[in-house]
Image (cartoon, helix red, strand yellow):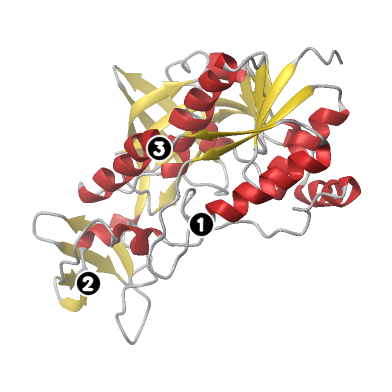
Amino acid sequence: MSKKIKVFVGLSGGVDSSVTAALLKRQGYNVTGVYMKNWSQDLPGYPCPWKEDYQDAKRVTVQLGIPFLMFDFEKQYHQKVVDYMIEGFKSGITPNPDIMCNQEIKFKLFLDTALEHGADLIATGHYARTKNGKLLTAKDVNKDQTYFLYRVTEQALQKTLFPLGDYTKPQVRKLADEFGLVTAKKKESMGICFVGKVGIKDFLKQYVKEMPGKIVDQSGKIVGRHDGAIFYTIGQRHGLDIGGGLPYYVTGKNMSKNEVFVTNNLNDKKLWRKEFSLTSLHWINDAPKYGQKLSVRTRHRAPLEDCTISLTGKTATIKLDGQLRALTPGQSAVLYGGNHVLGGGIIC
């Protein structure tokens, strides 16, 4: 491999991106590590881990003997990802900030900035594969992250490397040990992509006021109180604080009346759907054909479901061979043809 090929690796301070950089250096690329500073604000009880992550990323570059840069995207991140998420929740849907982060920040802003700084390619620690501008699923089906990547463009994929796509997570941990990386034993971060351990509800409370309201069951009976319809999502079971009997699940919301609707009947028709529509469509390469048989995934790590697609203008209708529970407006449905990720859209 010619050392003239310059690759900027997005280093998060975690083990996956660290191994990505190490693998690429071993393969002969001219590697530069880049920490993207997207968020630095502390929240009550949840100090932002960005300084620790930044230092871990820097330590990895020192270990590998590669240059280190930091790109400050905090302003753009707030506009493109955080504001998008907050406005989505306010309107009553459940947006996915991780998908928007990949679309707007990692594979647009980071890519463009890296190219401006002389990079030929970028690389990230995602578990995915790419070939000739196509997005393919990862070898490790349990770690496959293509659900979060479906809004990336063909042009971006042609400039992107996913070195972890042919490895399993245990293999990556083993490689981290073999490379002697300081991040080898670091635990995976959970929660919102940019805040760390804080949950969505705790984060939203920093931006919206609590508005107590009624929780109404399938028979119209008031069975409890909530602290704001904005904080609840379709299919949610935990956090309802309705005591006794069978568990309740959220089936819908009325944002104008600030009411949350629930059921304790798992067979309730409001929980299940055989057909649904998508808006804000994005196809990585070519759009699927009318009536094409595909597979769909409606949340990360959910099993693939067989389906048929029909396209009408800017919307798509997905007809399932079976049925799915708790399809959530605002979340994404991603369509697959075998191991090829076609694209998808937002559930409405």
Q: Position of residue 300 (x, y in %)?
A: 53, 47
Q: Quadrant of residue 268?
A: bottom left
Residue ID at (31%, 45%)? 329
The CA span between labels 3 and 1 is 15 Å
Residue farthest left in this picture: 257
Q: Amino acid at mark 2?
A: His
Q: Position of residue 238 (x, y in %)?
A: 39, 71
**Residue wearing tag 2:** 226
Alpha carbon separation for disc pair 2 and 1: 26 Å
- The residue located at (43%, 29%) in the rendering is 104
Crowd around label 1: few <14 · some 14–19 · many ≥20 (10 Å):
some
Q: Amino acid at mark 1?
A: Gly
Q: Secondary structure at mark 2?
A: strand
User: Which numbered tag is attached to residue 196?
Assistant: 1
Secondary structure, mark 1, is: loop
Res 308 seen here: no
